Image (cartoon, rainbow, N blue to C red):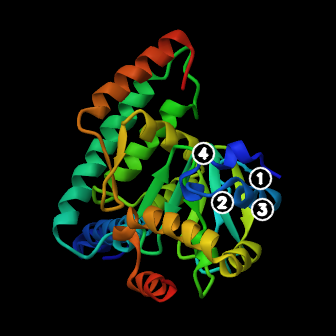
Amino acid sequence: MGGFSAISAGNGWLIAALGISVVFFGLASLAFIITYFPRAIRWWNDHAQSPKYTVQLLSSLFSQRETEATINADAGEGHEPGGPDDVEEALRLLTAHMKEPFKLPRLIEVAEQRGLARVHSTINRLLETGTMVGGTDGLFRWAKGSEKEGKAHSERGSGTGSKG
Amino acid sequence: MIPIDELKQYEILEELNPTELKILSAMAETTHAREGEVLIQAGLPARTLYILQEGNLMVAFPDGRAITFHKPGRVVGWSALVSPTSYTASVTCLTDCTLIAFPGSELLRLVQRNVAMGTKIMRNISKVLSRRLPFLQEEDRQRLRKGR
């Protein structure tokens, strides 16, 4: 007995398939780890190593996907990418990863690292309109219900073409 | 040079008489800064005291906390008057800003030479700082206590 019949007799096909699967899942796992490694490091740096932030991170990851989907759905005619409302949405996403109340200088630093435009003036507008508020402790938070108002403002802005 | 009428409306220069204001007017000058520009960097020698004329500022403390200023007359760079003269917080422009700048060394010399005027200015600065007390680090408080 030799050739293909010998392979079949010795469960060679099954062993080959198993080998291919092991290598495939190994490489897929490695790619997944490499993809999420920078995010994990960033999260580790941003937060004290408390277990409750793990829950926050996971919930923010899901809410981020929902918000991104909403932004994509809203992006139609007359929408200016990189406008003040987009920056506001991006800031909300960034603060979702931070513990609220958050540190304003850290938010600005992270936003600039992400390449957001006019971060300072957008934050100033949010502070002056009361959408973002500073506490007496020197930390900042989003005003309660401001997300809904902000969204309404955004929709008005998109409709009229005048933003800011 | 800044007009006296302009200077006397600011809290830090309250109670100063026209002669004193005239001296300050001669040393003050208007300066402009762009949105996002770091006006003051914490830890660097404090060479200038600023009064906000127009615009919006963020004062960021080394521990990451911050306060923002949106009204004219707010003072930043008080460290220029308190030894050792190094800035204790960073100041960044949230929008384009116009400020009145006082050279720290000249102002400090003036405050030390002219006791009456110095007392008024330092008292006004103390008033401003008392509102920022929660943000000051222990070493800043010690500097203020020594400066009194």
Q: In 3D space, how far apart are the residues under numbered discs 2 and 1 (Cα atoms)?
A: 9 Å
Q: Are marks 1 and 3 in contact (CB under 8 Å)?
A: no
Q: Which mark is residue B9?
A: 4
Nearer to me, B34 or A163? B34
Q: In 3D space, how far apart are the residues under numbered discs 4 and 2 (Cα atoms)?
A: 15 Å
Chain letter, disc 3 residue: B
Q: Which residue is mark 3?
A: B23
Chain letter, disc 1 residue: B
Q: Earlier in the sequence, mark 1 or mark 4?
A: 4
Residue A116: image x %, image y %? Answer: 57, 46
Residue B113: image x %, image y %? Answer: 71, 80
Q: Which mark is residue A89?
A: none
Chain letter, disc 2 residue: B
Q: Are marks 2 and 1 in contact (CB under 8 Å)?
A: yes
Q: In 3D space, how far apart are the residues under numbered discs 1 and 3 (Cα atoms)?
A: 19 Å
Helix, strand or loop at disc 3? helix
Q: Which residue is mark 1?
A: B31
Q: Which mark is residue B50?
A: 2
Q: Earlier in the sequence, mark 3 or mark 2?
A: 3
Quadrant of the rendered image containing residue B42: bottom right
Which of the two marks, 1 or 3, is nearer to us in this view?
A: 3
Residue B82: image x %, image y %? Answer: 58, 81
Helix, strand or loop at disc 4? loop
The kind of residue on which mark 2 rests is: Tyr
The residue carrying pointer 1 sits among few (fewer than 14), some (14 to 19) or many (20 or more) residues within 10 Å by Cα, namely few
